[in-house]
């Protein structure tokens, strides 16, 4: 796609980085629950179902709790090109 748009030397590099998503599991679940894609899907269900999903998210995040932080590893593709 980038090549077709006139870019050259297109490279994709997989990257990983440690990330902090909240002070504790409840904070992280609240943050993630308000994040675009998650908020969108929670808005498609009734309040009771959304609350149940957020409770399950908080429970899942507990295993990543450390003192003062919920730490996860984020991954992404770093795409570079020359115009």
Image (cartoon, rainbow, N blue to C red):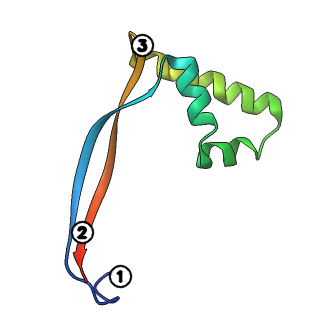
Q: Position of residue 77 (x, y in %)?
A: 30, 57
**Front label number (1 vs 3):** 3
- Residue at image position (28%, 85%) is 3
Label 3 residue SS: loop
- Residue at image position (76%, 31%) is 49
Q: Which residue is mark 1?
A: 1
Q: Which residue is mark 3?
A: 68
Label placed on residue 69: none
Q: Which residue is mark 2?
A: 80
Please, which residue is most extreme toward the front here?
A: 83
Q: Position of residue 38 (x, y in %)?
A: 61, 43
Please, which residue is most extreme toward the top here?
A: 67
Left or right of residue 68, residue 50 in this image: right
Q: Residues within 10 Å of mark 3 (few under 14, many from 20)?
A: few
Q: Position of residue 30 (x, y in %)?
A: 61, 28
Distance CA(mark 1)–CA(mark 2): 13 Å
Q: Against 52, is 14 above or below?
A: below
Distance CA(mark 2)–CA(mark 3): 35 Å
Label 1 residue SS: loop
The foreground one among 55 and 80 is 80
Q: How many numbered circles are shown?
A: 3
- Res 27 → quadrant: top right
Please tell me which of labels 2 and 3 falls first in the chain.
Answer: 3
Q: Quadrant of the N terminus?
A: bottom left
Question: Marks 1 and 2: CB-CB under 8 Å?
Answer: no
Please, which residue is most extreme toward the left here?
A: 9
């Amino acid at each position: 796609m980038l090549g077709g748009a006139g870019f050259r030397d297109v490279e994709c590099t997989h990257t990983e980085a440690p990330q902090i998503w909240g002070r504790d599991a409840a904070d992280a679940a609240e943050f993630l629950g308000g994040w675009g894609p998650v908020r969108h899907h929670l808005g498609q269900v009734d309040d009771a179902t959304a609350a149940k999903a957020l409770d399950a998210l908080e429970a899942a995040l507990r295993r990543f709790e450390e003192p003062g932080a919920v730490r996860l590893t984020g991954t992404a593709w770093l795409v570079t090109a020359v115009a």
